[in-house]
Amino acid sequence: MRIGELATKAGVSVRALRYYEEQNLLASERSPGGQRHYPDSAVKHVHLIQEMYQAGLPSKSIAEILPYLATGMVTPPLLERLAAERERIDRQISALAATRDRLDAGIAEAAANAAAGARCRLA
């Protein structure tokens, strides 16, 4: 499929796909006219890249992880890298949960104050 079709199916911009190629995260074949062509499996591949970006992984880390996911071959340094990324994600989840809990407490206090006709303070 061509780049526009992949962008539509994967729900990303053509610009994002070009960036993924620049970062060696995605590969295409070129037609004699220079147009990019991708296999059907590229849609899943792009979704995986998006998930890793959403988790906060930089493109360098993604580029190191993708070959393992494609081949299943793992090295000790890659295992260390995967474990470090998982720990970072766990810390991020904890921080987000703490922020959510603080917001919940503020919302509950504001709702109670509003119901009592008191001023709301969110500090």
Image (cartoon, rainbow, N blue to C red):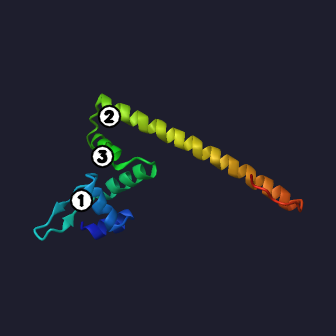
Crowding around mark 1 (Cα neighbors within 10 Å: few <14, some 14 to 19, many 20+) is: few
Residue placed under numbered mark 3 in the picture: 63
Residue placed under numbered mark 2 in the picture: 78
**Residue 11, how many percent across, how many down?**
39, 65
Looking at the rendered structure, which numbered label has been put on residue 39? 1
In this view, the residue in front, 103 or 27, is 103
Residue at the location (30% across, 45% down)? 66
Number of numbered discs present? 3
Residue 63 seen in this snapshot: yes
Q: Disc 3 versus disc 2: distance between alpha carbons? A: 11 Å
**Residue 64, how many percent across, how many down?**
30, 42
Q: Which secondary structure, mark 1?
A: loop
Mark 3 or 1, closer to the camera: 3
121 left or right, relative to 46? right
47 left or right, relative to 88? left
- Does label 3 or label 2 sit earlier along the sequence? 3
Residue 41 seen in this snapshot: no
Q: Which secondary structure, mark 3?
A: helix
Residue at the location (37% across, 51% down)? 48
Crowding around mark 2 (Cα neighbors within 10 Å: few <14, some 14 to 19, many 20+) is: some
Q: Tell me which amino acid carries mark 3.
A: Ala
Does the residue at mark 3 contact the one at mark 2 (Cβ under 8 Å)? no
Residue at the location (42% across, 39% down)? 85
